[in-house]
């Protein structure tokens, strides 16, 4: 299943005791049982997993949380009819065509099976000793062949396919494979192959004539530098390789460029306890980074939840989702309504306050700068907006100040925001560290300068209250982006956590302010109706 795992990194850990989510009733052919399962596909869209139930010659769909699975292909004995399968070793979903693609290994063929009420399969690749399947982002199909010791890519409608790994006979040289089983294709079309009987995982860059060893390759064994008949394989967005170490009864992670791996789950001897595996043969991840392992000789599928205590990606993902949906939820609707209505109530007050401003400019050289942004307020009086000094520094200039006063004092390494009643100058807009220029309309008859918004760093506003809402939303976004950079680019979890907390704080303040002002509007409306 070639989906890059984006919620995990080098420091991510998983809970060591798995949960049996399919086949917890021992080996058998009932709807709540499996028999030597092999392939697995996690379908987050439909909240289910598809399992190649090898010993029962069928494909089973198991919904999240269900006690029983549903046969969706095969299950009619071990034969070669169009409605039958024989020892299916892998299965994937072709979402574009709403179908399953199945490695019907015992019948030496690859078949396509409709997902909706499919009764029969269609042979799309005949005469192939297939084992593993995957599909790239273009919809091209990749299949491993354990007889020819190669991996081929098939574009839709092709008859022969193109060799993308191996194809030089059985062997242990870098241009050879020996019993290739599971495969994975990344965003750059590099192919990762579990080179099972060479006890290694190989990476074949697109167009390469030979592969690169990315896991194992030091002979069969159980040390951290070795593998023993590796099978299922997946790769995260950092290039780290996850592999089902079949005969060592564990799942391993090889960080990119590392000479040895680390144990992810298992490794406690073969067995059926929740912290043990017995010949793990397949693996996959869901969208949240939880790990699914096909525990072959235990006839079950184990789920190992991501350990949130060691993982920041879960928090980051939740915050990202919360923020991206912000303007679509009730608070977002209330916010838009609030600004529209409240501006009519506050504009006269703010203009009056702006004209009375006598705030003196402090010496900004006395401030101890760090990576926090600075908010410059020019020629305006600013009522309290509850700006925490841990989130941003606030510097105010009196009503006679000009943009030139700010420009003279700028530190080129510190990002900043500006609130002013004067339009932005070309010189201030040329400063790369300017994050946002809030242009306050100071006359009720002044038209909003929509042309300013052509530049996405300029926002026209018509009240101080509007400014507070925009600022906290922008600061929340700023710290979220910085957290992502710290996490994804620099692998600094501690810094990312601090930045995420600041981002959350900004949105909490914004939410409280919205609720407070909505209540004020309601009181005003009731008073107006009464009068």
Image (cartoon, grey):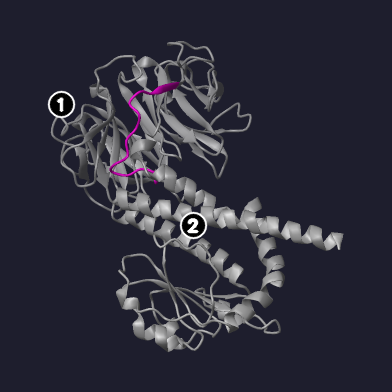
Q: Earlier in the sequence, mark 1 or mark 2?
A: 1
What kind of secondary structure does the magenta stretch mostly adopt?
loop
Q: Nearer the viewer, residue 441 or 295?
A: 441
Instruction: Look at mark 1 in the image and give the residue it sits on.
Output: 221
| Other residues around mark 1 within 10 Å, as few (<14) / some (14–19) / many (≥20) | some
Name the one closer to the observer, 45 or 390: 390
In the rendered structure, does residue 10 fall within the stretch colored magenta? yes
Circle 2 is placed at which residue position? 506
- Residue 111: horizontal and vertical position, in percent? 49, 32
**Rendered location of residue 287, percent (x, y):** 46, 40
Decide if residue 166 is on the left or right side of residue 35: left
Which of the 4 quarters of the picture holds residue 340? bottom right
Provide the secondary structure element on which disc 1 rests.
loop
Q: Is residue 174 above or below residue 82?
A: below
Quadrant in the picture for the C terminus: bottom right
* Residue 245 numbered tag: none
Vertical order, 318 against 361 (above or below): above
Helix, strand or loop under label 2: helix
Disc 1 to disc 2, C-alpha distance: 52 Å
Q: Residue 360: x, y in percent? A: 44, 81
Q: Position of residue 137 (x, y in %)?
A: 45, 49
**Is residue 49 found left or right of 365 in the rendered image?**
right
- Quadrant that contains the N terminus: top left
Q: Which residues are magenta?
A: 3-20
């Amino acid at each position: 299943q070639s989906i890059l795992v984006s919620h995990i990194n080098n420091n991510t850990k998983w809970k060591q005791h798995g949960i049996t989510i399919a086949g917890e009733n021992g080996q058998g052919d009932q709807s709540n049982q499996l028999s030597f399962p092999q392939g697995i596909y996690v379908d987050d869209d439909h909240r289910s997993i598809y399992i190649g139930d090898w010993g029962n010659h069928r494909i089973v769909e198991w919904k999240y949380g269900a006690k029983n699975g549903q046969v969706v292909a095969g299950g009619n004995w071990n034969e070669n009819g169009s409605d039958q399968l024989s020892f299916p070793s892998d299965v994937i979903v072709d979402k574009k065509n709403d179908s399953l693609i199945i490695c019907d290994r015992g019948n030496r063929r690859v078949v396509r099976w409709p997902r909706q009420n499919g009764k029969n399969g269609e042979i799309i690749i005949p005469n192939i000793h297939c084992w593993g399947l995957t599909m790239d982002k273009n919809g091209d199909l990749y299949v491993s062949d354990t007889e020819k010791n190669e991996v081929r890519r098939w574009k839709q409608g092709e008859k022969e396919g193109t060799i993308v790994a191996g194809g030089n006979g059985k062997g242990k040289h870098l241009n050879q494979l020996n019993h290739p089983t599971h495969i994975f294709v990344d965003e750059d079309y590099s192919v990762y192959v579990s080179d099972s009987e060479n006890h290694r995982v190989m990476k074949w860059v697109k167009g390469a004539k030979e592969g690169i060893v990315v896991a194992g390759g030091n002979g069969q064994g159980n040390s951290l530098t070795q593998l023993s008949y590796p099978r299922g394989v997946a790769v995260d967005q950092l290039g780290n390789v996850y592999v089902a170490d079949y005969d060592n009864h564990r799942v391993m992670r090889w960080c990119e460029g590392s000479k040895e791996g680390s144990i992810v789950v298992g490794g406690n001897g073969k067995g059926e306890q929740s912290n043990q595996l017995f010949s793990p043969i397949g693996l996959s991840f869901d969208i949240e980074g939880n790990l699914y392992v096909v525990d072959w000789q235990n006839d079950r599928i184990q789920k190992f939840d991501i350990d949130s205590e060691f993982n920041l990606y879960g928090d980051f993902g939740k915050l990202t989702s919360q923020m991206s949906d912000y303007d679509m939820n009730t608070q977002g609707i209330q916010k838009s309504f609030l600004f529209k209505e409240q501006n009519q109530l506050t504009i006269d007050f703010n203009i009056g306050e702006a004209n009375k401003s006598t705030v003196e400019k402090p010496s900004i050289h006395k401030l101890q700068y760090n990576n926090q942004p600075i908010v410059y307020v020019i020629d305006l009086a600013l009522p309290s907006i509850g700006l925490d000094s841990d989130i941003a520094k606030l510097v105010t200039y009196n009503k006679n100040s000009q943009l030139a006063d700010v420009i003279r004092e700028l530190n080129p390494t510190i990002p900043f925001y500006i609130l002013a009643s004067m339009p932005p100058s070309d010189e201030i807009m040329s400063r790369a560290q300017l994050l946002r220029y809030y242009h306050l309309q100071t006359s009720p008859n002044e038209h909003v300068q929509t042309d300013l918004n052509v530049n996405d760093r300029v926002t026209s506003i018509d009240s101080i209250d509007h400014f507070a809402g925009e600022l906290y939303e922008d600061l929340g976004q700023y710290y979220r982006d910085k957290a992502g950079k710290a996490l994804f680019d620099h692998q600094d979890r501690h810094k990312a956590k601090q930045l995420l907390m600041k981002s959350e704080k900004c949105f909490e303040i914004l939410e409280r302010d919205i609720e407070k002002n909505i209540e004020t509007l309601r009181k005003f409306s009731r008073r107006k109706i009464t009068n």
